[in-house]
Image (cartoon, helix red, strand yellow):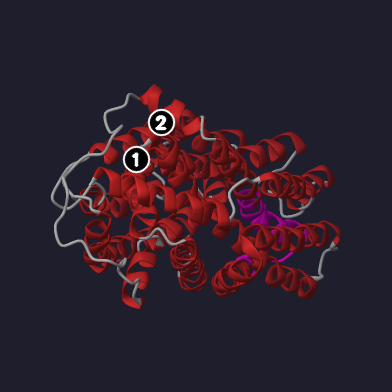
Amino acid sequence: MEISGKPSHPPKLTWSTKLAYGAGDMGAGLTSNLLAVSFLIFLTNVAGLEPWLAGSVLTIGKIWDLVNDPLVGMLSDRTKTRWGRRYPWIALTAIPFGATFYFVWIVPGLNSQIALFCYYILMSAVFQTFFTTTNLPYSTLTAEMTEDYDGRTELTSFRLAFSLIGAVLILALGAVVSGQVESPQRQYQILSILGGLVAIATTYWCVFGTFGHYQRQATYLGRSLNSGQEGDNDSFLEQLKIVFSNRPFLFVVGIYLFSWLALQITATVLPYYVVFWMDNPNYFLALLLVQGIAIIMLFVCNFLAKQIGKKGVYFLGGGIWILVQLGLFFLQPGQLGAMYLLCVVASFGVATAYVVPWSILPDVIEFNELKTGRRSEGAFYAFMTLLQKLGLAGGITLFSLALEYSGFDKDLTNQTESALWAIRIFIGPVPLILLVGGMILTYFYPITKATHAETLLKLAERRKQTQ
C-alpha cells in the first residue's frame, strides 16, 4: 500500500525524539546491570545456593531464550496494527516487564537447594520473557527511525547512554540502600521495586515520545504502518537461513559476542576482585566509575566515529581496554587508587563495545534488504538480543565454575590462593583474549560508510520502481 503525500526529505531527528528513544533502553540497562554484577553474589551469599547451582540458574533459563527471542522477533515482524509492528509489543508488556523483576530478587524461604534452584530458574525465565517482548521490538526501532549512517550511530549513542544511566542509577541506589538498610535480602527487594518502576516509566516515555517521528519516517519511505512486508510469513527455519546467510551479519555476531562476553565477565568478576583481592568490601564505586564515565564516552565514540570510522573507534577502544585488563591482573592488594584510575580508563573501551556492534547492525539489515528484498529487523535484532543474554549467562556460568573448582568458600573472608588466582585470571587474561578476537573480526568486517551509501542508493532506486 502506498502512502500519499510523501515528503521529499526524511524527517529530522529532534533532540526530544532522540532523548525519548534513548529512554527506552534505560529499564533494560538497569535490570541487566543489576543481574550482571549482583545476581551471582546474591544467589550464593543471600539466597544460599551453592556456586555451581547459582551459576547454572541463568544458563538454564537461557534455554527458553533460544526459543523466546527468535519467536518474539518473528512475531513482531508479522504484527499488523495501525500503530505499526513494534509499538503494541512495547506498550502492552512494559508493566509485566517491570513487575516481574521483583520476583527475581526475593528469597522464597525454601530449605531445599533444588527447590531454590527451580524457583530462580522459573522466575528468571518469566522475567526474561517480558524483557524480550518489551526490549526486542524497541531495539529494532533503530533501523526503522532513520536510514542515515551517522544518524544511526547517534541514535545508538543516545540509546546506550540511557542504558548506562540506568546501569549507574541502580548502582547508586544500591550504594545508598546498602548504607541505610541492614538486611541484604531487604536491600535487593527495595532495589528491584525501584528498578521496576523506573523501567516502566521510561518505556512509556519512549513510546509517547517517538511514535510521531516513527509515523513521519514511514510516510517518507512510502510504508503503511498496518501493512506487512515481503517475508513476514517465513517459517523459523527460513528466517534462520536468511539471517545466517548474511555474511556481514556473521561478523557482527562475532564482534558483539566477543565484546559482550568480555564485558559481562569483567562485570561479574569485578565485585569478587574488589572484595577478595583488593580487600575492599564496597565494590559499587569501581562499577560506578566504569559505567558512569562510559556515558560520556558514548558521545566521544559518536564524535570519533565520524572522524575515523566505526572500525577505528573499535580498534582504539579495544586496545585501551586490553591494557586496562592487564593492569588489573598485575595490581596488588591495597592499590585502590591505581584500580580506580584503571576503571576510569576502561570506560572508553566499554563504550566502544556498546556502540560499535549495535550501530552497524542496521547497516547489515539494509544489506539484507538489497540482497533478498526483505528487511526482517525483528529476526536480526532477536539473535543479537539472544547473544546479549547468552553473554551474560555465559560469563556468570564460566566464572561460577571457576570459583567452584578453585575452592572458593562463600563463608570465608580470606579466600584460598587458588580461588584468588581464578578471580585474577578472569579479570585479566580471559577478557583480553576475547577482545583480541573481536578486533580481528572488526578488521575483516566488509561494510564501510561508502558501501552503505551505495546500498541505500540502490534501495531507493528499487523503491521508486515499485511505487
Can residue 327 be spotted in the picture?
yes
Q: CA distance from mark 2 to mark 1?
A: 8 Å
Residue 466: percent from the left, percent from the top?
26, 43
| Rendered view: 436 above or below 210 | above
Residue 20: percent from the left, percent from the top?
32, 69
Identify which residue, 152 or 435, lies in the foreground: 152
Judging by the rendered image, the residue that carries numbered circle 2 is 64
Give the amino acid type for the residue marked by disc 1 in the picture.
Answer: Thr
Residue 281 shown in magenta: yes
Q: Residue at x 44, y 30 (%)?
A: 242
Q: Residue at x 21, y 58 (%)?
A: 219
Identify which residue, 221 or 325, lies in the foreground: 221
Magenta stretch, overall SS = helix
Identify which residue, 55 or 352, lies in the foreground: 352
Q: Is residue 73 left or right of residue 396?
A: left
| Rendered view: 246 above or below 85 | above
Residue 260 shown in magenta: no
Q: Is residue 14 left or right of residue 185?
A: left
Judging by the rendered image, the residue that carries numbered circle 1 is 129
Can residue 122 be spotted in the picture?
no
Q: Earlier in the sequence, mark 2 or mark 1?
A: 2
Report the quarter where the N terminus lies. Answer: top left
Q: What secondary structure is found at the residue carrying circle 1? A: helix
| Mark 1 residue crowding within 10 angstroms, few (<14) / some (14–19) / many (20+) | many
Please report contact status of discs 2 and 1: CB closer than 8 Å, yes or no: yes
| Rendered view: 390 above or below 464 | above
Q: Which segment did they paint magenta?
A: 263-287
| Mark 2 residue crowding within 10 angstroms, few (<14) / some (14–19) / many (20+) | some
Residue 308: percent from the left, percent from the top?
66, 67
Q: Locate residue 79: give its quadrant.
A: top left
Give the amino acid type for the residue marked by disc 2 in the picture.
Answer: Trp
Q: What secondary structure is found at the residue carrying circle 2? A: helix
